[in-house]
Amino acid sequence: DAGVIQSPRHEVTEMGQEVTLRCKPISGHNSLFWYRQTMMRGLELLIYFNNNVPIDDSGMPEDRFSAKMPNASFSTLKIQPSEPRDSAVYFCASSPQGEGIYEQFFGPGTRLTVL
Amino acid sequence: RKEVEQDPGPFNVPEGATVAFNCTYSNSASQSFFWYRQDCRKEPKLLMSVYSSGNEDGRFTAQLNRASQYISLLIRDSKLSDSATYLCVVNPRGSSASKIIFGSGTRLSIRP
């Protein structure tokens, strides 16, 4: 199994530009999570989906952030317009759904730098 | 108060030593607990789940104290490869399809 795939692995952009991060979850996993990690705030959950439906987006910092999951094998996180304070590592994770199955499998992350 | 709190460390111990760290959580109704490990510039990975009766996996022992709302991780005979950040994780609802809360992590450095 290829694991969770994220792209790009690194992104450097200028303030005001649109940024799109992509995630392919592990095949068969029903839940998908987007996290952001910074030194100051640690690992924060931004949004998660169950069966492609957004369940909790209370962690999305503001309207500049949006996430979609058009099908079971693909999700995007978009920042428009980007700001320097958005610089962080963004992780996507997936998990099989069901009682007794708890592990979340993380992708390698996208390291975003906004200048 | 943070939902999950950890001592950020760093813990700097010699190879072969035993090291332990705790994590406290605020939601007394929390259902499931875990330790994840994150290596520098890598993604978090599950180290072990934490059960009420305590559980052991080789050199690693995890314990849960519901009355005091903390979990602990003990590493015996530490190896250089144990150097990493250890993240305490709490699942308030006990289902994989729900939000889990990560602590900010405890950094461990093992010296030769």
Image: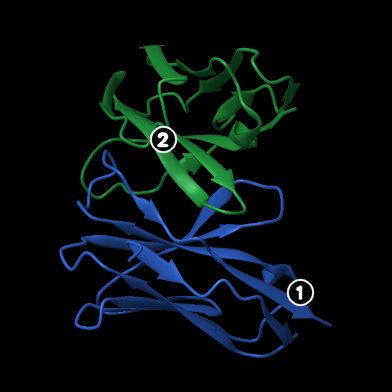
Under mark 1, the amino acid is Leu
Give the chain of mark 1: B
Give the chain of mark 2: A
Q: Is residue A16 visible?
A: yes
Under mark 2, the amino acid is Leu
Q: Are marks 1 and 2 on the same chain?
A: no
Q: Which residue position is annotated with label 2?
A: A46
Query: Drawn colour of chain A?
Result: green
Query: Is B46 or B8 nearer to us in this picture?
Result: B8
Q: Which residue position is annotated with label 1?
A: B80
Q: Residue at x 46, y 71 (%)?
A: B6
Q: Residues within 10 Å of mark 2 (few under 14, many from 20)?
A: many
Query: Drawn colour of chain B?
Result: blue
Query: Is A93 or A101 nearer to us in this picture?
Result: A93
Q: Secondary structure at mark 2?
A: strand
The image shows residue A77, relative to residue A86, as above or below, that is: above
Q: Residue at x 19, y 82 (%)?
A: B67
Judge depth for marks 1 and 2 and give the one in front: 2
Q: Residue at x 65, y 86 (%)?
A: B77
Q: Secondary structure at mark 1?
A: helix
Q: Position of residue A32 (x, y in %)?
A: 39, 30
